[in-house]
Image: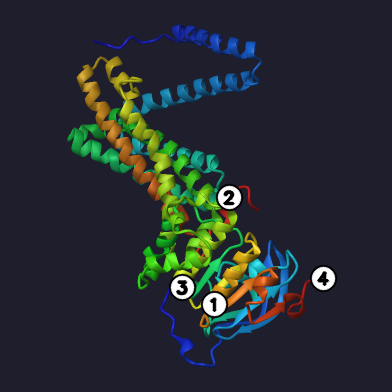
Amino acid sequence: MTIIDISFLNLALAYLMFVVPLAIMMWLRLPMISDTLIAMVRMTLQLLFVGFYLQVVFKLNSVLLTGLWLLIMIVIADLSIVRSCGLRLRAVAGGVFISLLIGTLTPLMFFVFFVFQDSAALGAQYVIPISGMILGNCLRADIVGMQTFYESLRRQEKTYIHTLAQGAGLMEALLPFVRKAFHAALAPTVAAMATIGLVALPGMMTGVILAGGDPMTAIKYQIAIMIAIFSGTALTVLLAIFLTTRGNIGIDGLLKQKIFADQK
Amino acid sequence: MNTLPLADKDPAIKAINIEKLELRAAGSTLFSNLSLTLEPGEKLLIKAPSGFGKSTLLRALLGFVPISAGSISIFGNELTSRSAWQLRSRMAYVDQEPDLGDDSVETVFSRPFSYKRNRHLQLNSRRITELMGQLGLPDSLRSKKITALSGGEKQRIALISALLLERDILLLDEPTSALDEETTFSVARLLRERKELTILAISHDPSLAGALDRTVDLRQRTRKPS
């Protein structure tokens, strides 16, 4: 089985499907048509760029180039997380970067050396999609986790101070907030694992099937990637919280308000 | 978080010694030149108009507000951001509108006993019942969620939680603002009975003021920025 290619002309026809949501928006007079059009253009340009770049990366199949691609993706994810959480770049970007690096590389390496048990899996064809899926989920989980952690620490400062005043150590006082953030960040992945295959066919499985793979192979890939995503997100959320608290909590135990982008 | 020497074995040591203290908030000086001492077991009420910095003073005593000038010593140990961790275990603090989370009353009482620094303390269930009774709270309240409690009940729960820790110093920020006169009297009696306990309280309540040893007007003890 080979995959049917889509010509650029045929792809242009796919854009016709945009007419339906755009028509609904016009009918409802929603002020999101320009945003949608910008998003559509961005999606096209970004994916075309990635497509051309990946063609080169796959052709050269160099570990260095693949690593560079991964590094760039991590930096972009890092910046996106910091901005989405309303935190100051200088205060947290370093911690988030390390957390993403470890959170993505650890399950990726596990995947390559224990699941595939084949060094060929270090090639761009495997590393890029697998790390991309793990990183994408780490990004989402980090945003939820970090936002929940810092916002609740800010909102419930009184409870936090009360805990410290009662003699709690730093870790003891932070733990309820870490627990809450970790739960919020991981709950969507747990829910996704519980309904996978029933509600929607997951991306990786669809990819393998479209590429002509056996559905059972597709399922095995999907199970492995789900576990990799779950462990990656767990690792990155916990590391992101702990690494960013370093330097942003004073010797007195209080959170420095300058961590928030809206604080002068 | 080093272990501090027990300087308070010396009878000349003050429970709280504030010298020429200046506190700032949001970039401006709240007050300066405050000097105040509390002997062990002394019970002091401080008063000043709203916004003067009374609550900030209590938070500064716990090491949560940086000292811009002067010094604070707790039982002879100078309070710094570093020493605050240990000195906090000599003090208990009751906030004006205590935010005790959303767990049950029982959890609020037991949680501080799980902290490493409080492990030498034993939670005494009978003592909880006794204190609750003295402050007019039924024992059945212990299984209730904090969120289901009234403001006055929360204040009393916070006070009991502070007393259970058996600290040397009790810092109270308007601890009876949501209580009726009768309950305020019960609180005053309870505090009065604790001869060893040093208390620094902020209150506008005359019933509570009567139970304390003396009152200090911060306006007469400090320099306010013009």
* Secondary structure beneath label 3: helix
* Front label number (4 vs 2): 4
Which mark lies nearer to you, 2 or 1?
A: 1
Q: Is residue B221 above or below residue B131?
A: below
The residue tagged with tag 1: helix, strand or loop? loop
**Residues at marks 3 and 1 touching, judged by CB atoms closer than 8 Å:** no
Earlier in the chain: of badge 4 and badge 1, it is 1
Q: Give the answer, above or below, for where A143 lies relative to B141.
A: above
Which numbered disc covers residue B89? 3
Inspect the image, locate mark 3, and give the three-letter code of the amino acid beneath it: Ser
How much space separates mark 3 and mark 1, taking CA atoms? Answer: 12 Å
Residue hosting label 1 = B79
What residue did someone put label 2 on? Answer: A260
Chain letter of the residue beneath label 2 in the structure image: A
Q: Residue at x 55, y 23 (%)?
A: A39
Residue B23 pos. (x, y %): 67, 71
Q: At numbered mark 2, what does the secondary structure look like: helix, strand or loop?
A: loop
Q: Residue at x 47, y 40 (%)?
A: A143
Residues marked 2 and 1 touching at CB (< 8 Å): no
Same chain, labels 2 and 3: no
Amino acid type shown at disc 4 = Ser
Q: Name the subunit of mark 1.
A: B
Residue at 55 percent across and 41 percent down: it is A83
Tell me the distance, in whole angstroms, between the alpha carbons under discs 4 and 2: 32 Å
What residue sits right under mark 4 in the picture?
B226
Instruction: Give the chain letter at badge 3.
Output: B
Circle 4 Cα neighbour tier, 10 Å, few/some/many (<14 / 14–19 / ≥20): few
Question: Looking at numbered disc 1 in the image, what kind of residue is underneath it?
Answer: Leu
